[in-house]
Amino acid sequence: MSQKSLNNNDLRNDPFIKQFFARIPSQTAATFTDIQLAELKSVFRDRFGKRHPIDIRVSIPFLKRRFYIVLIIGKEKRSPK
């Protein structure tokens, strides 16, 4: 087995990629290249992989339904724009 096919297999068996593919049509999933999948994983890891110093999540019942409130506090890292 070549190194390229091993990496392809590993990437397509990655838990994040499997979960991503589960949420989109299979014919669309088949169109992604390995480079695109690696970039998607990188973007989502950078976006969602970081923890905040304060992360409070509360679910509350209100009028026969449940709602949630999220309070996240951390150092500002976005540009002023």
Image: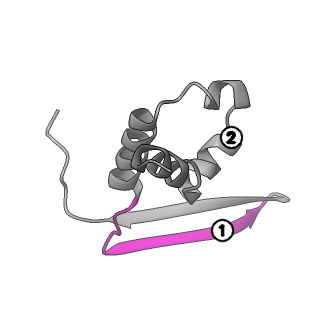
Q: Nearer the viewer, mark 1 or mark 2?
A: 2
- Left-right relation of 13 to 42: right
Residue depicted at x 63% and y 51%: 19
Give the percent coordinates (x, y) of residue 33. 47, 31
> Which residue is more in the foreground, 1 or 36?
1
- The verdict on residue 29 being magenta is no
Give the magenta range: 49-62
Q: Is residue 5 left or right of residue 67?
A: left
Badge 2 crowding class, 10 Å Cα cut-off, few under 14, some 14 to 19, many 20 or more, is few
Q: Give the residue at x 50% y 51%.
A: 1
Magenta span: predominant SS is strand
The x, y position of residue 25, in whole percent, is: 72, 30
Residue 24's quadrant in the figure? Answer: top right
Please, which residue is most extreme toward the right here? Answer: 64
Regarding mark 1 in the picture, which secondary structure is present there? strand
Q: CA distance from mark 1 to mark 2?
A: 25 Å
SS category of the residue bearing label 2: loop
**Which image quarter holds the C terminus?**
top left
At 33% across and 69% down in the image, what residue appears? 52
Residue at the spot of label 2: 23
- Vertical order, 72 against 43 (above or below): below
* Quadrant in which residue 71 is drawn: bottom left
Please report whichever mark, 1 or 2, sits nearer to the chain's N-terminal start. Answer: 2
Is residue 80 shown left or right of residue 65? left
Neighbor class of circle 1 (other Cα within 10 Å; few <14, some 14-19, many 20+) is few
State the mark number for residue 36: none
**Residue type highlighted by circle 2:** Arg
The image position of residue 4, as x and y in percent, is 42, 44
Q: Residue at x 58, y 59 (%)?
A: 15
Q: Which residue lies under the disc numbered 1? A: 59
